Image (spheres, helix red, strand yellow):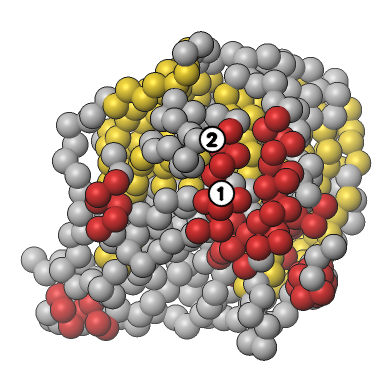
Amino acid sequence: MLPSQFLLSRVAWASGLVLAGSALLGCSAGPTLVAAEASPAQAAQAVTAANTLVLSDQPRYQVSPYPERITLLPGAAASSSAQVTWRTNSSVTESLLQLAVATPSPGLHMQAKQLIGRSIKLNSPNGEAHHHRVQLSQLQPDTLYAYRVKGLNTWSSWHQFKTPAADFKPYTALYFGDAQNAVLSHYARTVREALLTAPRAKVMLYAGDLVNSRDGVHDDEWAEWFAATSWMAGSIYQLPAAGNHEFSSDDDQPIRYLLPHWVAHYEVAGNGPEALSDTVYYSDVQGVRYIALDSTEALQSEQLAQVQAQWLEQVLANNPNRWTVVFHHHPMHSVSMGRDNPPLRKYWQPLYDKYQVDLVLQGHDHTYGRDHQAASATATDSQGPVYAVSVAGPKMYLVSEQAQATMDRLGEDTQLFQTLEFHQDRVKYQAFTATGELYDAFVLHKTAAGKQVEDLQPTTAERRCSNPNKPKPHRCWNGTDLIHAPAAAQ
């Protein structure tokens, strides 16, 4: 049983699906123009904080009868199951999806079968929305499908996706750290460059803090998230982990609760612990088991850290896949100044070592860090995973002295994405900057004798903060200080 306060937090979340409180969904102020004559230091002080490109007096993302925010998520066995979610306004009362095996012919509708799902209601300053979800089951492995979803007397475009093979086959996945701030303005270039680098990626994995969810209109932030990922969200399997910015808390209640937009947009596999099934889950994708954990809940409740550990051990002990990737928001080994997460090391890290997890992918620290170190007294390097912390958006912190002493590779002031190339006996990991430069790379080899990390040592110099007007001693950029930043004087 959960403590009563956690049950209450979920009641608050559930009610938000029907009537999201205005206290959580306020309006942001419009931009302030900065005079061109201001000095760089004056301009930095005068820039108005903004988290989206939306003007307060010019709504941009009001709900409509047209289907939008279409998202494809894998089921527990992605070769045979998936979930599709999308949004319309409340005039659309049926959740209908047409699915067909894709062919070169435009007559996809002739072979399509119609599937009926359900919807949940979510109110925001952009209007009353119905968030639809349809389960896809009994799919054939390694098969190209096409689908479209219904609006009011209209349909979306046809999306295509290929189901994974039932057994291992080589493929590429993409991994992103926090987007969070200025998502359309600044994060979008990262995700676009990622797809240009790995155009046949089968999975897009997110380590939390997709949006900011603090001041301003939350629904605008989610709208910009989907504008940035565009059609990719509906055609490439999405694997999100919830970060602390997917949660909020009331003034009189320190316990954070999951905000309603998360569940509205993401119907994950649902095979996690009952109390955490909206954020904790696993999906098997072509010989790789991806396990999402909820580090926010673990850090605010030791009980929920233990609940996840008990579930995790079962999932790791009964894992037939060739590779295992665990991902969560808060790092096991922090990279940024003044951060540390001991409960994760206490309850989760011994299991990573015991069951020889291959990769642990994380966010939160708004820096880059990668290390491979044995976590527990009984572990060896050949057992312990490689840990990575990355950031895809513009909010940037500074690395700590501890990280400088222990990490294999570090970075500040750099938007990044990562490619994971899975092969039978190795995984090739590459971290690229938003401008396409290779910043970090290694190959994780797996043999009968254990695992070995081969550091590829890219020639790119280690990057540090370049902002001469840091907003705080431990920050390079706030992220909200960039949308309306003036150009440099000529």
Q: Residue at x 29, y 39 (%)?
A: 408
Picture residue at 50% right of the left edge, 35% below the top? 378
Q: Horizontal and vertical percent for residue 386?
A: 43, 35
The local secondary structure at tag 1 comes to: loop
Quarter of the image for the C terminus: give it.
Answer: bottom left
Q: What is the crowding at mark 2: few (fewer than 14 residues within 10 Å), some, or many (at least 20)?
A: many
Query: Badge 1: how crowded within 10 Å, few (<14), some, or many (20+)?
Result: many
Q: Amino acid at mark 1?
A: His
Residue 347 visible within the image: yes
Comes first in the chain, label 2 or label 1: 1
Q: Which residue is mark 1?
A: 328
Is 287 located above or below residue 378 in the figure? Answer: above
Tag 2's secondary structure? helix
Residue type indicated by callout 2: Asp
The count of marks equals 2
Taking the spot 19% from the left edge, 65% from the top edge, the residue there is: 467
Q: Which residue, given by chain and number where applicable, does mark 2 sit on?
A: 353
The quarter of the image holding the N terminus is bottom right
